[in-house]
Amino acid sequence: MTEKNASPVKIVLASSNPGKLTEFQQLLAGAGFDVRPQSEFNLIDAVENGLSFVENAIIKARHACQATGLPALADDSGIEVDALNGAPGIYSARFAGTGASNQDNNQKLLQTLADTPAPLRTARYQCVLVYMRHATDPTPVICQASWEGRILSAAAGDGGFGYDPLFYLPSHNCSVAELSKQEKGTISHRAKALKQMLQALS
């Protein structure tokens, strides 16, 4: 964290996902951080060969630190569906195959759950954030948060990204894609994990 009036701390976001970049820039704008996308440094994505959200987030953060020399923030997140034993989980971004679009992944999830009744379509978004000061940081800051909901039988809303049109929030009686950006930025799994991260870094 930086003192008021001090220059913001430049950090690199270890992600090529434009939706995530927009969210992080909004969430961190007032906290003394200047979040730069890894694309600004011509950085290609790390090979995510970890077996958990935590492992993949560490791999991504370390990769970005090594390539840029800057502190890095990495997010590994995804959706866990109880009827699928936690899948797609760490494979959420490529559930329908490598290079799959959001629409491809959503379509595959709908097809996979076609015969699953509404009460059994419980799911949660998971987010793990890792902040590394440098590539050999022995104590990266790791924060994790989840967001409970269930999977709809058809997409609703056109906001957000990823599985947001399918992720229904009983508490708000709508999908995440039907929330305003401000509301999502207050109650999402990513917002909750980031709040923990800011407390840890302050």
Image (cartoon, grey):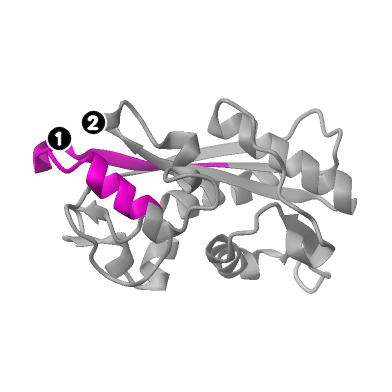
Q: Earlier in the sequence, mark 1 or mark 2?
A: 2
Question: In the rendered structure, does residue 116 fall within the stretch colored magenta?
Answer: yes
Question: In the rendered structure, does residue 81 fall within the stretch colored magenta?
Answer: no
**Spot occupied by residue 90 in the image (x, y as percentages of width and height):** 49, 36
The kind of residue tagged 2 is Ala
Residue 55 lies, with reference to residue 115, above or below; the image says above
Relative to residue 154, is residue 131 drawn left or right? right
Q: Residue at x 60, y 64 (%)?
A: 21
For this rendering, which residue is in front, 53 or 6?
53
Q: How many callouts does the rendering have?
A: 2
Q: Residue at x 39, y 63 (%)?
A: 184
Relative to residue 123, is residue 153 drawn left or right? left
For this rendering, which residue is in front, 30 or 92?
92
Q: Would you identify the image quadrant in which residue 61 lies?
A: top right
| Labelled disc at residue 83 | 2
- Does any portion of residue 187 appear in the rendered image? no
Provide the residue designation for mark 1.
Answer: 120
Q: Residues within 10 Å of mark 2 (few under 14, many from 20)?
A: some
Q: Residue at x 19, y 39 (%)?
A: 121
Per the rendered image, the range of residues in magenta is 105-128
| Labelled disc at residue 74 | none
Q: Secondary structure at mark 2?
A: helix
